[in-house]
Image: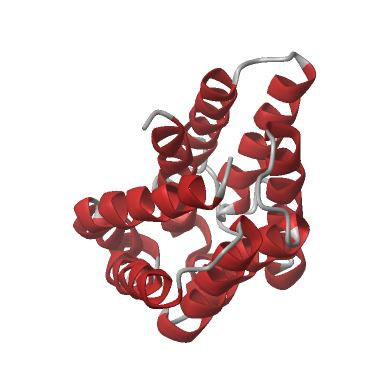
């Protein structure tokens, strides 16, 4: 997977976030500030522009630039959290011109660790961690099982989507939604939903 692959990933993310912007905002309206979709749409549009202007030479440089852009352009907690995830992935890749599936798995673990560290969230807290953690586990298992890239990314995407859906019956313990207490039950967490879209976009990039 080279720089072009990761550029395609960001293109896929920007497209799916734009298409699902209103849905993400509706999810956020139930338990948050009703701006999650608009914020992410703005952030990934800015990331696309930054990549077009800079043309990073390596996957690591590309993802660090995306992360830095999200931190600057996305409001609320989402900017630092998603920005940290992409920056940690980029730093994990270093200056390698290409990475393999195992290295992608290690980078996804680094992204998850960064998000957990910044947000102080664990699985079951009804956050983006509930989608990212299952995705990271599924990808690691796929690597151990020797699956091809398409199957491995598909497994990660499916696990992320299942994790996001599993937040519906949970009571939020972190973030703005936690202020609602029991009223947060019955709603899908918008951060988990957008994380699942991002991992799904990784699968789509691998199918190009």
The residue at 73%/54% (across/down) is 96
For residue 5, above or below residue 44: above
Is 127 left or right of 100, judged from the image as shown? left
Q: In this view, does 116 lie to the left or right of 84?
A: right
Quarter of the image where the C terminus is located: top left
Compared with 130, 102 (above or below) is: above
Image location of residue 83, percent across then percent down: 56, 71
Instruction: Say how many tags the image has.
Output: 0
Residue 156 image offset from top left, x and y in percent: 57, 31
- Specify the quadrant of the image occupied by residue 1: top right
At 58% from the left edge and 24% from the top edge, which residue is drawn?
149
Q: Which of 183 and 174 is in front in this view?
A: 174
Kindly tell me whether residue 22 is visible in this rendering.
Answer: yes
* Front-most of residues 45 and 77: 45
Q: Nearer the viewer, residue 121 or 75?
A: 75
Please identify the quarter of the rendering in which residue 22 is found. bottom left
Q: Which residue is drawn at 37% across and 73% down?
A: 43
């Amino acid at each position: 997977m080279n720089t072009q692959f990761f550029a395609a990933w960001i293109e896929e993310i920007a497209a799916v976030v734009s298409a699902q912007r209103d849905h993400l905002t509706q999810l956020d309206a139930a338990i948050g500030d009703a701006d999650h979709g608009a914020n992410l749409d703005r952030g990934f549009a800015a990331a696309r522009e930054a990549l077009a202007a800079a043309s990073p030479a390596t996957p690591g440089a590309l993802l660090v630039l995306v992360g830095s852009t999200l931190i600057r352009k996305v409001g609320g907690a989402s900017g630092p959290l998603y920005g940290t995830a992409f920056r940690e992935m980029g730093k994990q890749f270093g200056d390698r011109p290409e990475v393999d599936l195992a290295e992608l798995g290690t980078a996804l673990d680094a992204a998850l660790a960064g998000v957990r560290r910044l947000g102080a969230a664990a699985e079951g807290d009804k956050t983006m961690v509930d989608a990212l953690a299952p995705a990271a586990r599924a990808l690691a298992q796929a690597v151990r099982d020797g699956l091809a890239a398409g199957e491995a990314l598909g497994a990660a995407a499916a696990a992320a989507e299942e994790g996001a859906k599993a937040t519906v019956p949970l009571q939020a313990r972190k973030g703005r939604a936690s202020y609602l207490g029991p009223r947060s039950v019955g709603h899908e967490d918008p951060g988990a939903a957008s994380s699942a879209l991002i991992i799904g976009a990784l699968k789509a990039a691998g199918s190009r």
